[in-house]
Image: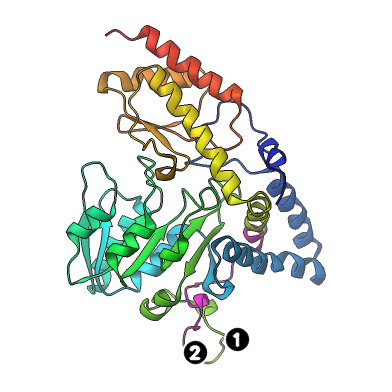
Amino acid sequence: MGDLETYLQSFDGEPGYLDWAAFGPLAPAVREEAQGDTELLGSGRSAGIRLVTDHVREARELVADLMDVAMDQVVLQPSATYGLMHAVYGLEGGLMLGRGEFPSLTVAATRAADALGSLELQWLEPPDGRITPDVVRAALTERTRALAVSLVDFRTGYRADLAGLREVIGDRLLIVDAVQAFGMVDADYGAADVVCGHGYKWLRAGRGTGFAWFGDRALERITPVLSGFRGVEGDLPVDEVPAPARSAQAYTVSGPDTLAAARLATALRDVADVGVAAIETELAARTGDVIFFADRYGIPVITPREPEQRAGIVTLEPAPRDAAPLAASLANHGLTVTVRAGRIRVAPHVGTGADTLRLFGDALAAFSSARTW
């Protein structure tokens, strides 16, 4: 394992950034790797090109190691949305998912159902937005073939119970959007059948760094509808159209971006060196700090209080008349957060320092002192 303190010090951005659930400023090692590999690709030397290309293998291997799965079940994607589209377009029967899921899921599922006619969408609409085992159990039907869910809900920060969901759905497919959690929490990915992630938020790897894992059940039951010419075994398929590969490679459209793979591999190596468990513990402390300040100044929090039920997102839900003044106070104090539909999503990372948390507390104090009860 690497040094956690060294990892924490790699967060070199200016104070005030609390929006990691929207975008993760690139890590120093990622920036250095990208610059070096760009020069290699510009050299025209075959050895340099091969070196950069090998990052595709490295990134897949690191994803597989962090999930404790076989590397041939991991495939790189331009984004998590691409992986989710591969999953839902290849399904038949009932697909259960929350109406409030991130649009990567809801839009892909709706488009697939409209285009193919073989997919029946079974919408879940719990009042608090949490897709719990009890919610799923109450809605299951004989036609349900799969459940799609975010590991961490982008609105509330609720962390789904994958093991509990698996117990409820039996041998149906469990498709997981892990964008808001991968590498940050020690999740039970073995309970899932498909896991899609992306490196541009918490992993600090930038855009284009998506990936997906398709387990044995998924490989058996999900037709590779969107499979392209890179989704076959062997060399370039000229003068023939072979069957899709038997591995996760089948869920590929074209060749991967090797520079993106280099950024992803570098970011994943940083996480693997420190260890997900250590990162999860530190992140729980940072979200706990945010909740502490919110409680201190009477700002309602809708994110679960239990560390095992959250990751890096803390969502505040002030009274309607307070939402705009609170958002303004945060902005005036130099803080970057996401404000949407009257809620304020605060997303610290493990490297969020005391100076940023102090600004957050000052912003809440200023708002509280100006508030008229």
User: Is disc 1 placed on a helix, strand or loop?
Assistant: loop
For image coordinates 81% across by 70% down, the residue present is 47
Quadrant for the C terminus, please.
top left
The figure's colour scheme reads rainbow
Res. 203 in view: no
- 10 Å crowding of disc 1: few (<14), some (14-19), many (20+): few
Q: First in sequence: mark 2 or mark 1? A: 1
Q: Nearer the viewer, residue 304 or 103?
A: 304
The structure residue drawn at horizontal position 73% and vertical position 52%, both measured from the top left corner, is: 33
Q: Are marks 2 and 1 in contact (CB under 8 Å)?
A: yes
Q: Secondary structure at mark 2?
A: loop
List x then y, in percent, for residue 44: 80, 66
- Residue range (magenta): 241-261
Q: Nearer the viewer, residue 302 or 264?
A: 302
- Image: 248 above or below 96: below
Asked if the magenta segment contains residue 259, the reply would be yes
**Mark 2 closeness class: few <14, some 14–19, many ≥20 residues within 10 Å:** few
Give left or right: position of 102 versus 238: left
In the picture, the disc for residue 318 is none
Relative to residue 48, is residue 237 depicted above or below?
A: below
Where residue 82 appears, x then y in whole percent?
A: 45, 63
Residue type, mark 1 in image: Gly
Give the residue number, with chain letter if any, for mark 2. 242
Gap in Å between the C-alphas at discs 2 and 1?
10 Å
Name the residue at 46% across, 31% down: 337
Question: Is 315 placed left or right of 7 in the picture?
Answer: left
User: Which image quadrant for residue 257?
Assistant: bottom right
Residue 182 image offset from top left, x and y in percent: 51, 53
Residue 234 badge: 1
Q: Amino acid at mark 2?
A: Pro
Was residue 329 drawn as part of the magenta stretch in this picture?
A: no
Give the residue displayed 27% in from the left and 75% down from the top.
92
